[in-house]
Amino acid sequence: MRRRTAAFALMAMMSVTAGYAAVADLVITKSGPVSGTVQPSASFFYSISITSNGPDTVGPVTVTDVLPQGVTFVDAQTNNFGASCSGTSTITCTFPLLGPNTFAGVGIQVLAPSAPGPFTNTASVSSAASDPNPANNMSSVTLTVVAPNTTADLSVTKQGLASTVPVSSTVVYDLTVRNNGPDSEPAPVVTDTLPPGVTVISVNPIVGTVSCSGTNTLTCSFGPVASGGFEEAALIVKAPSAPGPFTNTATVTSTTADNNPDNNTSTVIGTVSGVTTGLPECNIVTANFAGAPGTATEHRYATPTGKPCPRGTRTMSPART
C-alpha cells in the first residue's frame, strides 16, 4: 500500500511539474532600500518575494529580473532548497516546485549607477500553470541616485563697462562665477534673461570655459570650479535702439547644495542715452586702454544729429557737450 501511495505521489508531482491542468495564482513583490535613494556606485540589495495562492502545486517557477542600464550585478541568492539563479544583466532564478500558500525569496546584490537620477527595476514571475490573476505577476521598484552630501557657495557678479551707453551700441558685460566652497562645483550654470531690445552678439570665455545657448534667455554652462576658484566670461550685446533705462540680471545655479543663495543673482542697471535739444551727445566707438596707467586712447564718432564731436571733449563714457 505504501509503495502504491508513493507511486501515486510521484505521478502527481510529475503531472504538476509538466503543468498539466495545474492552476496557481503566483504573486511577486520587489523592494529596495526603504529610503528610496542610493549613493552613486554604492552597493545595495533588491529583495524579491514570490507567493503562490494555489490552488495547485506548480513547478518549475521562474523569476526574471532585467537590471536597468548602469546597474552592475554582484550576487544573487535564494532561500529555497533546490532553487538556483544565473545571469548578470538578466537574472533568472528557478524554483523546482511551489505549493499553495507557500513562499520563496530571492536577494540580488547590485551596484547603483554612477550618475545621479532615478532608475526603475522590474521583476516578473511565471510558470507553465494557468494563472487566474496575471496582474500580480510583475513588480517594479524606482530608486534615485543622489549626489554625495556636498556644499558649494556659488556667487555670480555681473558688471557693465559703462552705466550709460549710446543707442544700438555694443555693450560688454563681465560675468564672474566664484566658488566660495567648501566643496568643488562640477557644472555651474548661469541664466541671463536679456531685457527687451537687447540683442546678444557673443559670449567669450576669459577664465575657464563657457558654452551658451538661447537668444532672449541665455543659458551658459561653465566648467568645473574648485573651492576658492572662479570662471569668467564676457557677454557682448547690442543696446536697445530707444533711449531709456534697462535692467539685466544673471542667476547662477549648481548641482551641489548652496547654503548661501543670497549671492546667486547679480543685476546691472544701464541707461541708453538719447538726444536732448540743444545738447547733442558725443559717443565713443571704442576705447583702447593702453600705455601708462590712467591713460587711454579714444575714438569718437558723430552725434545723432550728424554733427561731429567737438574737439577736446573727453568721452570715456557718453557725455553731453
Image: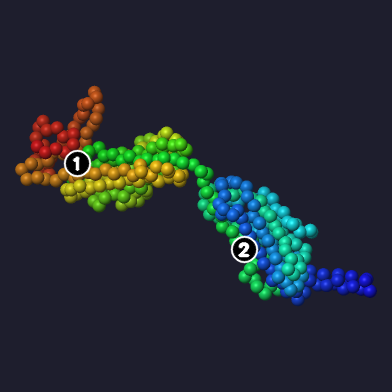
Vertical arrangement, residue 126 with respect to residue 200, above or below: below
Residue at image position (72%, 61%) is 104
What secondary structure is marked by label 2? strand
Residue at image position (55%, 52%) is 37
User: Which mark's residue is nearer the viewer, 2 or 1?
Assistant: 2
The amino acid sitting under disc 2 is Ser
User: Which residue matches tag 2?
Assistant: 139
Is mark 2 in CB contact (under 8 Å) with mark 1? no
Residue reaching furthest left?
Answer: 278
Instruction: Quadrant for the N terminus, please.
Output: bottom right
Residue 143 position in % (x across, y down):
56, 55
The front one of 2 and 137 is 2
User: Which residue matches tag 1?
Assistant: 164
Left or right for 161, reference 22: left
Q: In which quarter of the image is residue 210?
A: top left
The front one of 309 and 193 is 193
